[in-house]
């Protein structure tokens, strides 16, 4: 039996925002590893496991947005779980397309819920998005209606792309890491 050395408690980055960025990359990596395991049939191909993978992606993106915003503004990260709000603030801080991130879930999460053909129609969806992959029902016990399909091969590629984008952005934003 081989001895395994304990993992030391260390996160790269000198600032809290940089640490949040690096942690976001770890959540994206975990999602990638689990999706790859699902493709290789070493992680059960069942709907509940797809929720875990997508929750890891969602949390990775939330941490990434918060860390990137805090790094740019030099303030504490926003105190919200709403990806549409975070995405809007992120785009204000990083308007260049080179900072765009392709998330492996529907774009409605980022759309302005008050614009479009049906103003406010996305509000419930966006407000509860942080719950959709963690719980089978909303806060009042109603099941989440949409049950989108999950193709492990397609999602594997999308998640790998998502993770590489986050990883690249973390290196771009956390320039202190290289100082």
Image (cartoon, grey):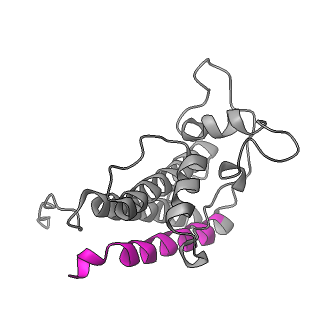
- Residue 35 shows up from this direction: yes
- Residue 172 highlighted magenta (yes or no): yes
Specify start and end residues of the magenta stretch as a single range.
155-179
Q: Residue furthest right?
A: 117
Left or right: residue 162 compared with residue 69: right
Q: What is the count of numbered marks?
A: 0
Q: Quadrant of the N terminus?
A: bottom left
> Where residue 35 sits in the image (x, y, percent)?
54, 62
> Where residue 48 sits in the image (x, y, percent)?
58, 42
- Residue 121 highlighted magenta (yes or no): no
- Residue 41 shows up from this direction: no
Residue drawn at the location 61% of the way across and 72% of the way down: 157
Question: Where 55 sits versus 68, above or below?
Answer: above
Q: Residue furthest bottom?
A: 178
Q: Residue furthest top?
A: 140
Quarter residue 146 falls in = top right
Left or right: residue 115 compared with residue 74: right
> Where residue 86 sits in the image (x, y, percent)?
53, 51
Q: Quadrant of the C terminus?
A: bottom left
Q: Main secondary structure of the magenta part?
A: helix
Q: Nearer the viewer, residue 116 or 7?
A: 116
Question: Where 71 sits versus 111, above or below?
Answer: below
Q: Nearer the viewer, residue 151 or 22?
A: 22
Left or right: residue 8 compared with residue 125: left
Residue drawn at the location 52% of the way across and 67% of the way down: 36
Quarter residue 97 falls in = bottom right
Residue drawn at the location 35% of the way across and 63% of the way down: 71
> Where residue 120 sits in the image (x, y, percent)?
76, 36
């Amino acid at each position: 039996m081989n001895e395994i050395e304990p993992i030391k408690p260390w996160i790269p980055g000198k600032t809290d925002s940089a640490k949040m960025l690096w942690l976001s990359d770890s959540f994206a990596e975990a999602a990638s590893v689990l999706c790859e395991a699902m493709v290789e049939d070493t992680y059960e191909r069942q709907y509940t496991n797809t929720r875990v993978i997508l929750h890891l992606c969602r949390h990775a993106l939330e941490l990434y947005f918060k860390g990137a915003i805090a790094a740019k503004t030099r303030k504490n990260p926003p105190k919200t779980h709403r990806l549409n709000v975070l995405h809007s603030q992120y785009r204000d801080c990083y308007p260049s397309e080179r900072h765009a991130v392709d998330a492996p879930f529907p774009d409605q999460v980022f759309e302005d819920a008050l614009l479009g053909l049906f103003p406010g129609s996305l509000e419930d969806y966006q407000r509860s998005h942080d719950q959709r992959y963690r719980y089978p029902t909303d806060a009042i016990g109603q099941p989440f209606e949409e049950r989108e399909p999950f193709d492990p091969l397609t999602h594997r590629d999308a998640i790998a792309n998502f993770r590489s984008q986050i990883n690249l952005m973390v290196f771009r934003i956390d320039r202190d890491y290289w100082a």
